[in-house]
């Protein structure tokens, strides 16, 4: 399997990280994640790489309630602090290692980075990621494009009426180069 990005490093970055369908969805309707269970493969060592470089996780309440709800990232292999940004922390179901925050998104990043201890703060929320992009607080976006078309669900970046956000590739070579992928539909 080819790899067009360098290995992730623990450099105290704010990292917006998702596996995404080819049509731009990071979850199905209602935060459904069952589409990821169909034999997808990642490059060897990828999960261990993120387990090693992640110091803390920041997510949103609706994702926590619907999809995660007590589960630990990376199949339980990662055990650091999780911060869930919510307007209603008082009705959140407590979980070990999870702190529910009711604050500005920039303050949540400050808290998460402090807890990350020099490692990366991974952002697992499309809504929080969009807000951080708008404020210039995302250092990198790390996407794993899955060979599936969902058709509907929760988009990585949904900003109707907003201006395009230009990105530069975090790899050797031309930073504005288009990434090329090619798939064939799976036949029954």
Image: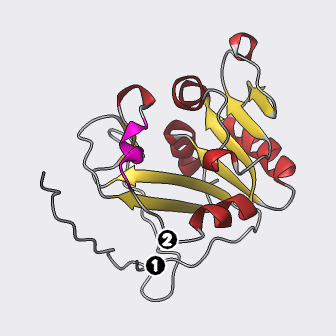
Relative side of 171 to 122, left or right: left
User: What distance separates the C-alpha of mark 1 from that of mark 2?
Assistant: 8 Å
Q: For numbered disc 2, what is the local secondary structure?
A: loop
Q: Is residue 65 magenta?
A: no
Q: For numbered disc 1, what is the local secondary structure?
A: loop
Q: Residue at x 45, y 79 (%)?
A: 4
Which quadrant would residue 86 be assigned to in this image?
Answer: top right
Bin the neighbour count of mark 1 within 10 Å (Cα to Cα): few under 14, some 14-19, many 20 and up: few
The answer to whether marks 1 and 2 mark residues whose Cβ atoms lie closer than 8 Å is yes
* Name of the residue lying farthest toward the front: 188
Residue on which disc 2 sits: 43
Q: Which residue is drawn at 70% across and 51% down?
A: 77
Residue on which disc 1 sits: 3
Q: Residue at x 51, y 37 (%)?
A: 127
* Name of the residue lying farthest toward the bottom: 173
Q: In this view, does 11 lie above or below 126?
A: below
Relative side of 178 to 51, left or right: left
Bounds of the magenta span?
33-39
Instruction: Mark 1 or mark 2: name the one nearer the start of the chain.
Output: 1
Q: Which mark is residue 74?
A: none
Relative side of 8 to 89, left or right: left
Name the colour scheme: secondary structure
Estimate the x, y position of residue 187 in percent, counting from the top left: 12, 55
């Amino acid at each position: 399997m080819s790899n067009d990005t360098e290995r992730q490093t623990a450099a105290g970055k704010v990292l917006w990280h998702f596996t995404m369908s080819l049509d731009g969805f990071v979850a199905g309707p209602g935060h459904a994640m069952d589409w990821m269970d169909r034999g997808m493969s990642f490059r060897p060592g990828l999960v261990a790489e993120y387990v090693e470089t992640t110091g803390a996780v920041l997510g949103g309440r609706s994702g926590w309630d619907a999809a995660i709800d007590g589960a630990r990232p990376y199949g339980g292999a990662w055990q650091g602090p999780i911060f869930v940004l919510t307007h209603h922390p008082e009705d959140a179901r407590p979980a070990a290692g999870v702190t529910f925050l009711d604050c500005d998104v920039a303050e949540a990043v400050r808290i998460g980075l402090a807890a990350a201890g020099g490692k990366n703060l991974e952002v697992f929320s499309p809504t929080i990621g969009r807000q951080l992009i708008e404020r210039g607080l995302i250092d990198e976006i790390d996407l794993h494009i899955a060979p599936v078309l969902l058709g509907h669900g929760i988009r990585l970046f949904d900003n109707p009426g907003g201006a395009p956000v230009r990105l530069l590739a975090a790899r050797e070579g031309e930073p504005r180069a288009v990434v090329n992928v090619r798939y064939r539909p799976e036949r029954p």
